[in-house]
Amino acid sequence: MGKMSEKAIQEAYRLAKDAYGSWGIDTEDALAQLDKLPISMHCWQGDDVSGFEAPEGELTGGIVATGEYPGKARNGDELRADLEKAFSLIPGTHRLNLHAIYAETGGKAVDRAELKPEHFAGWVDWAKENRLGLDFNPTLFSHPKSVDGFTLSHPDKTVRDYWIEHCKACRKIGASFGEKLGKTCVTNIWIADGFKDVPVDRMTPRQRLMESLDEILSEEIPKEHNLDAVESKLFGIGTESCVIGSHEFYMGYAATRKTLLCLDAGHFHPTEVISNKISSALLFLEGILLHVSRPVRWDSDHVVTLDDELIAIAHEIVRSGQAERIHIGLDFFDASINRIAAWVIGTRNTQKALLYGLLENTAELAKVEAEFNYTDRLALLEELKTMPFGAVWDYYCLTRGVPVGSSWLQSVKQYEADVLASRK
């Protein structure tokens, strides 16, 4: 793998800056804007969604982490060390997305409904040290009270009440993150409830889910500390015929209850894309949460690559002019490759897509479009595709103190040899 000198990177950037400048595009402004777009990196890539509950149970809720790559994190200290390694190879300042099963309880069994901010004190201290914001998720899967395939929509009120209390506790934990860190936390609710075969009654479970969510959100929490989000899904393993929390359900719920709507790239029909939903959702909602992932024929949560849909998502974020209302998070877990490399690849690709979107003379293109000059629009968009984007990205990495190009991979391999290889 070749390595460019610092001088070569700077010279290539100078030429790229001039090339973009001839289009009226300010590369320095684009880089400054990119610095202001944090990505919430998900902790569960580091340990295959295992969490710290003991004993470690089987994944349920249609969640599958495939592969047995050695060296996964086994506790909070290992996971944080791995995350620090990943963040050191990613430009910019970002966030971490936690699930409730990553509570640290000092070896004591603490019921999910009894979780408190103190059980995440280690995460808060670490986030402060690393200048990170924290986001949060209740964990409504992989639990004895989720084995029926239903949680917040369960026909048994005692089961519903249990999960309601868990979600209430998680909202308070999320609010504590926001207050202590001075960075608003997004607490996202996703459930796997649904039917494997075609149900007779779809209405009643959805009525129960609505009532459960209303009870969860009944306590007002300052929005500067915590924002609530709800996440839909088309289908999952064991819920092929009907998911209770469908897109239509949550779109209506988010609009009427003034929560964020989470759009996960893998949670729709294979022919649907979330890039086409962003603008419509923003017209009716206070904001949206994105779970950037890569489905391969189904919601398989593959590591994000710099593909057409990722670039389209980034373009929508930039072109909408509503980036402050869009919260960007990642959601994938691949146990077949080095887990730290997966984080670095996925996060850097998401940043590359955002930079690609920022390096566009959007106002000029919109003007041409408004004049019905579709010939010029197509021609200009196609010419932009071959502009020297890579030189700007390399310069961004260089000036933000992280490895340029693929040179980060050697650092991950060394970490694997020095740290991960000793984990059994």
Image (cartoon, grey):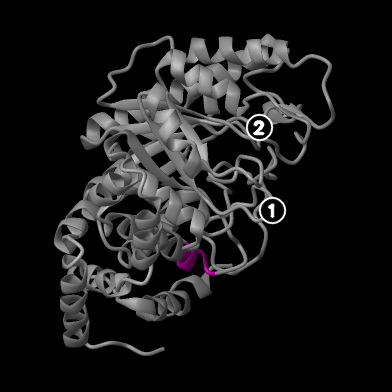
Q: Which residues are magenta?
A: 338-342
**Foreground residue, 292 or 224?**
292
User: Based on the displayed image, in which of its 4 quarters is residue 157 positioned?
Assistant: top right
Residue nearer the viewer, 338 or 269 = 269
User: Would residue 393 be seen by someone viewing this image from the given angle?
Assistant: yes
How many residues crowd around disc 1 within 10 Å: few (fewer than 14), some, or many (20 or more)? few
Magenta: predominant secondary structure element? helix
| Residue 71 included in the magenta stretch of the image | no
**Element at label 1:** loop
Residue 80 coordinates in the image, percent (x, y): 38, 55
| Relative vertical location of residue 410 with respect to residue 84 in this rendering, above or below | below
In what element is the residue under mark 2? loop
- Residue displayed at 59% across by 45% down: 266
Q: Which residue is mark 2?
A: 192
Q: Which residue is mark 1?
A: 297
25 in relation to 258, above or below: below
